[in-house]
Image (cartoon, grey):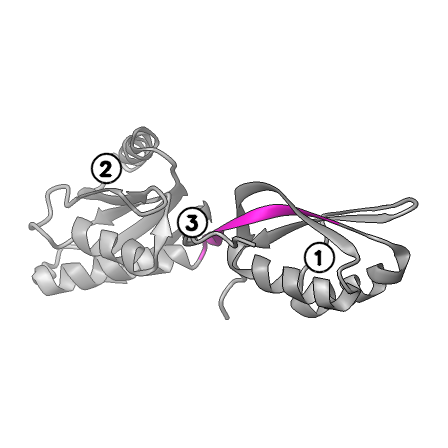
Amino acid sequence: MDGGAQDSYRVLLEGGQGEYVEKKSRFIATLRRCESVEEAMGFVEEMKKKYWDARHNCYAFCIGPKGELTRCSDDGEPGGTAGRPMLEVLTKEGIRNGAVVVTRYFGGVLLGTGGLVRAYTQAVKEGLKSCVLGRMRHGYEVRIETDYNGIGKILYILGNEGIEPSSSDYTDKVTLGLTLPGERLEALHKNLVEATGGKMIFEKIKELYYVDKERPQG
Protein backbone atom coordinates (compact mmCIF):
# COMPACT_ATOMS: atom_id res chain seq x y z
CA MET A 1 0.00 0.00 0.00
CA ASP A 2 1.16 3.54 -0.69
CA GLY A 3 1.53 5.53 2.53
CA GLY A 4 1.95 8.93 0.91
CA ALA A 5 5.07 11.01 1.30
CA GLN A 6 4.06 14.59 2.02
CA ASP A 7 5.49 16.34 5.04
CA SER A 8 3.53 17.55 8.01
CA TYR A 9 3.88 21.12 9.22
CA ARG A 10 3.06 23.18 12.31
CA VAL A 11 0.24 25.69 12.25
CA LEU A 12 -1.01 28.39 14.57
CA LEU A 13 -4.49 27.25 15.63
CA GLU A 14 -5.33 29.95 18.15
CA GLY A 15 -3.49 33.22 18.60
CA GLY A 16 -2.38 34.80 21.84
CA GLN A 17 -0.48 37.68 23.40
CA GLY A 18 2.64 38.14 25.48
CA GLU A 19 4.75 41.03 26.75
CA TYR A 20 8.43 41.70 27.28
CA VAL A 21 9.91 44.74 29.04
CA GLU A 22 13.45 45.98 28.43
CA LYS A 23 14.74 49.20 30.05
CA LYS A 24 11.18 50.51 30.45
CA SER A 25 10.29 49.87 26.79
CA ARG A 26 7.22 47.62 26.50
CA PHE A 27 7.10 45.09 23.68
CA ILE A 28 3.60 43.61 23.26
CA ALA A 29 3.41 40.63 20.90
CA THR A 30 0.04 39.72 19.43
CA LEU A 31 -0.26 36.57 17.29
CA ARG A 32 -3.14 35.44 15.11
CA ARG A 33 -3.91 32.62 12.71
CA CYS A 34 -3.95 33.96 9.13
CA GLU A 35 -4.33 31.92 5.95
CA SER A 36 -3.67 34.59 3.31
CA VAL A 37 -1.53 37.68 2.81
CA GLU A 38 -4.69 39.80 2.75
CA GLU A 39 -5.83 38.39 6.08
CA ALA A 40 -2.39 38.96 7.61
CA MET A 41 -2.18 42.57 6.40
CA GLY A 42 -5.72 43.20 7.67
CA PHE A 43 -4.58 41.96 11.08
CA VAL A 44 -1.56 44.30 10.96
CA GLU A 45 -3.77 47.30 10.20
CA GLU A 46 -6.11 46.31 13.02
CA MET A 47 -3.23 46.26 15.49
CA LYS A 48 -1.94 49.63 14.23
CA LYS A 49 -5.35 51.15 14.90
CA LYS A 50 -5.61 49.51 18.31
CA TYR A 51 -2.13 50.67 19.34
CA TRP A 52 -2.20 53.96 17.46
CA ASP A 53 -0.27 55.75 20.19
CA ALA A 54 2.70 53.33 20.14
CA ARG A 55 6.08 54.27 18.67
CA HIS A 56 6.31 51.13 16.49
CA ASN A 57 4.06 48.28 15.31
CA CYS A 58 6.45 45.82 13.66
CA TYR A 59 5.16 42.65 12.03
CA ALA A 60 6.05 39.32 10.45
CA PHE A 61 4.08 36.47 8.99
CA CYS A 62 4.64 33.05 7.42
CA ILE A 63 1.85 31.52 5.34
CA GLY A 64 1.47 28.34 3.28
CA PRO A 65 2.36 24.65 3.81
CA LYS A 66 6.00 25.33 2.89
CA GLY A 67 6.10 28.84 4.36
CA GLU A 68 6.24 30.19 0.82
CA LEU A 69 4.57 33.50 1.69
CA THR A 70 6.56 35.60 4.17
CA ARG A 71 6.83 39.28 4.90
CA CYS A 72 8.21 41.41 7.70
CA SER A 73 8.55 45.09 8.61
CA ASP A 74 10.71 47.06 11.04
CA ASP A 75 8.15 49.93 11.03
CA GLY A 76 10.74 52.62 11.64
CA GLU A 77 13.15 50.66 13.83
CA PRO A 78 16.75 50.36 12.53
CA GLY A 79 16.87 47.96 9.57
CA GLY A 80 16.95 44.28 10.51
CA THR A 81 16.36 44.79 14.24
CA ALA A 82 12.65 43.91 14.46
CA GLY A 83 10.77 42.32 11.56
CA ARG A 84 13.50 39.89 10.48
CA PRO A 85 14.22 38.57 14.01
CA MET A 86 10.45 38.19 14.56
CA LEU A 87 10.09 36.21 11.33
CA GLU A 88 13.04 34.02 12.30
CA VAL A 89 11.25 32.96 15.49
CA LEU A 90 8.28 31.77 13.42
CA THR A 91 10.43 29.98 10.84
CA LYS A 92 12.72 28.32 13.40
CA GLU A 93 9.64 27.01 15.22
CA GLY A 94 8.33 25.77 11.86
CA ILE A 95 5.07 27.67 12.29
CA ARG A 96 2.85 28.25 9.25
CA ASN A 97 -0.30 30.33 8.81
CA GLY A 98 0.64 32.67 11.62
CA ALA A 99 1.19 36.42 11.87
CA VAL A 100 2.66 38.46 14.71
CA VAL A 101 2.65 42.17 15.47
CA VAL A 102 4.98 43.47 18.16
CA THR A 103 3.95 46.85 19.51
CA ARG A 104 6.66 48.94 21.18
CA TYR A 105 6.04 51.69 23.68
CA PHE A 106 9.35 53.52 24.00
CA GLY A 107 10.69 53.73 27.54
CA GLY A 108 13.11 56.60 27.00
CA VAL A 109 16.30 54.52 26.88
CA LEU A 110 17.93 53.50 23.60
CA LEU A 111 18.55 49.76 23.42
CA GLY A 112 21.03 49.59 20.54
CA THR A 113 20.71 47.17 17.63
CA GLY A 114 21.62 44.08 19.66
CA GLY A 115 19.16 45.02 22.40
CA LEU A 116 16.37 45.58 19.88
CA VAL A 117 16.95 42.20 18.22
CA ARG A 118 16.83 40.46 21.60
CA ALA A 119 13.72 42.34 22.73
CA TYR A 120 11.68 41.71 19.58
CA THR A 121 12.77 38.07 19.52
CA GLN A 122 11.86 37.53 23.16
CA ALA A 123 8.51 39.29 22.77
CA VAL A 124 7.44 36.84 20.05
CA LYS A 125 8.56 33.90 22.20
CA GLU A 126 6.48 35.25 25.10
CA GLY A 127 3.48 35.61 22.81
CA LEU A 128 3.81 32.04 21.53
CA LYS A 129 3.50 30.72 25.09
CA SER A 130 -0.19 31.71 25.10
CA CYS A 131 -0.96 30.33 21.62
CA VAL A 132 -2.40 26.96 20.64
CA LEU A 133 -0.28 25.17 18.06
CA GLY A 134 -1.08 22.10 16.01
CA ARG A 135 0.51 19.89 13.40
CA MET A 136 -1.14 19.60 10.01
CA ARG A 137 -0.59 16.00 8.95
CA HIS A 138 -0.96 14.31 5.61
CA GLY A 139 -3.05 11.17 5.93
CA TYR A 140 -5.94 9.04 4.81
CA GLU A 141 -9.46 8.23 5.84
CA VAL A 142 -9.57 4.43 6.05
CA ARG A 143 -12.39 1.88 6.29
CA ILE A 144 -11.76 -1.46 7.99
CA GLU A 145 -14.25 -4.29 7.68
CA THR A 146 -13.99 -7.62 9.51
CA ASP A 147 -16.01 -10.30 11.30
CA TYR A 148 -16.57 -10.68 15.02
CA ASN A 149 -13.66 -13.11 15.34
CA GLY A 150 -11.23 -10.51 14.03
CA ILE A 151 -12.47 -7.33 15.70
CA GLY A 152 -10.90 -8.06 19.10
CA LYS A 153 -7.46 -8.48 17.54
CA ILE A 154 -7.89 -5.32 15.46
CA LEU A 155 -8.99 -3.20 18.42
CA TYR A 156 -6.08 -4.57 20.48
CA ILE A 157 -3.57 -3.49 17.80
CA LEU A 158 -5.22 -0.10 17.36
CA GLY A 159 -5.11 0.45 21.13
CA ASN A 160 -1.40 -0.36 21.25
CA GLU A 161 -0.82 2.06 18.38
CA GLY A 162 -2.77 4.82 20.13
CA ILE A 163 -5.29 4.94 17.26
CA GLU A 164 -8.92 5.58 18.14
CA PRO A 165 -11.60 4.77 15.52
CA SER A 166 -13.61 7.78 14.40
CA SER A 167 -16.65 5.58 13.74
CA SER A 168 -17.83 2.01 14.30
CA ASP A 169 -20.76 0.00 12.97
CA TYR A 170 -21.67 -3.42 14.37
CA THR A 171 -24.14 -5.37 12.18
CA ASP A 172 -23.58 -8.82 10.66
CA LYS A 173 -19.99 -7.59 10.29
CA VAL A 174 -17.93 -4.85 11.95
CA THR A 175 -16.89 -1.69 10.13
CA LEU A 176 -14.48 0.87 11.58
CA GLY A 177 -13.54 4.32 10.28
CA LEU A 178 -10.03 5.69 10.96
CA THR A 179 -7.93 8.72 10.13
CA LEU A 180 -4.26 7.76 9.81
CA PRO A 181 -0.99 9.59 9.12
CA GLY A 182 0.27 8.57 5.69
CA GLU A 183 3.57 7.23 7.06
CA ARG A 184 1.78 4.72 9.34
CA LEU A 185 -0.57 3.28 6.74
CA GLU A 186 1.56 0.46 5.34
CA ALA A 187 2.83 -0.89 8.67
CA LEU A 188 -0.65 -0.89 10.22
CA HIS A 189 -2.15 -2.65 7.20
CA LYS A 190 0.53 -5.35 7.43
CA ASN A 191 -0.03 -5.89 11.18
CA LEU A 192 -3.80 -6.17 10.80
CA VAL A 193 -3.54 -8.63 7.91
CA GLU A 194 -1.20 -10.84 9.97
CA ALA A 195 -3.41 -10.64 13.07
CA THR A 196 -6.61 -11.60 11.23
CA GLY A 197 -5.11 -14.06 8.77
CA GLY A 198 -6.17 -11.76 5.97
CA LYS A 199 -9.85 -11.95 6.95
CA MET A 200 -10.48 -8.23 6.69
CA ILE A 201 -10.90 -5.38 4.24
CA PHE A 202 -8.58 -2.37 4.56
CA GLU A 203 -9.65 0.40 2.19
CA LYS A 204 -8.36 3.94 1.65
CA ILE A 205 -11.45 6.17 1.29
CA LYS A 206 -9.77 9.52 0.66
CA GLU A 207 -6.55 11.48 1.05
CA LEU A 208 -6.63 14.47 3.39
CA TYR A 209 -4.85 16.80 5.76
CA TYR A 210 -5.90 16.86 9.39
CA VAL A 211 -4.78 18.69 12.53
CA ASP A 212 -3.20 17.18 15.62
CA LYS A 213 -3.38 19.73 18.44
CA GLU A 214 -0.08 19.95 20.30
CA ARG A 215 0.00 19.56 24.04
CA PRO A 216 1.09 22.71 25.90
CA GLN A 217 4.73 22.57 26.95
CA GLY A 218 5.50 22.38 30.64
Quick one: label 2, few (<14), some, or many (20+) residues within 10 Å?
Answer: few
- Residue type (three-letter) at the residue carrying disc 3: Val
Q: Position of residue 153 (x, y in %)?
A: 80, 66
Q: How many marks?
A: 3
The residue singled out by tag 2 in the image is 53
- Residue type (three-letter) at the residue carrying disc 2: Asp
Which residue is rendered at x = 29% and y = 45% of the image?
62
Which residue is rendered at x = 36% and y = 45% of the image?
65
Q: Which range is magenta? A: 130-144
Location of residue 189 by image quarter: bottom right
Whole-Å distance between the Cαs marked 3 and 1?
23 Å
Would you say 190 lies left or right of 135 here?
right
Whole-Å distance between the Cαs marked 3 and 2?
31 Å
Res 72 seen here: yes
Label 1: which secondary element? loop
Which residue is rendered at x = 28% and y = 44% of the image?
61
Whole-Å distance between the Cαs marked 1 and 2?
51 Å
- Residue type (three-letter) at the residue carrying disc 1: Glu
**Mark number for residue 164?**
1
Looking at the picture, tell me which residue is in the foreground, 175 or 161: 175
Q: Position of residue 108 (x, y in %)?
A: 13, 55
Which residue is rendered at x = 28% and y = 32% of the image?
41
Would you say 29 lies left or right of 216 here?
left
The residue singled out by tag 3 in the image is 11
Q: Nearer the viewer, mark 3 or mark 1?
A: 1
Q: Position of residue 89 (x, y in %)?
A: 28, 58
Query: Is 218 above or below relative to 34?
Result: below
Query: Is 134 above or below relative to 53?
Result: below
Q: Earlier in the sequence, mark 3 or mark 1?
A: 3
Q: Is residue 185 magenta?
A: no
Looking at the picture, tell me which residue is in the foreground, 102 or 148: 148
Q: Position of residue 66 (x, y in %)?
A: 32, 47
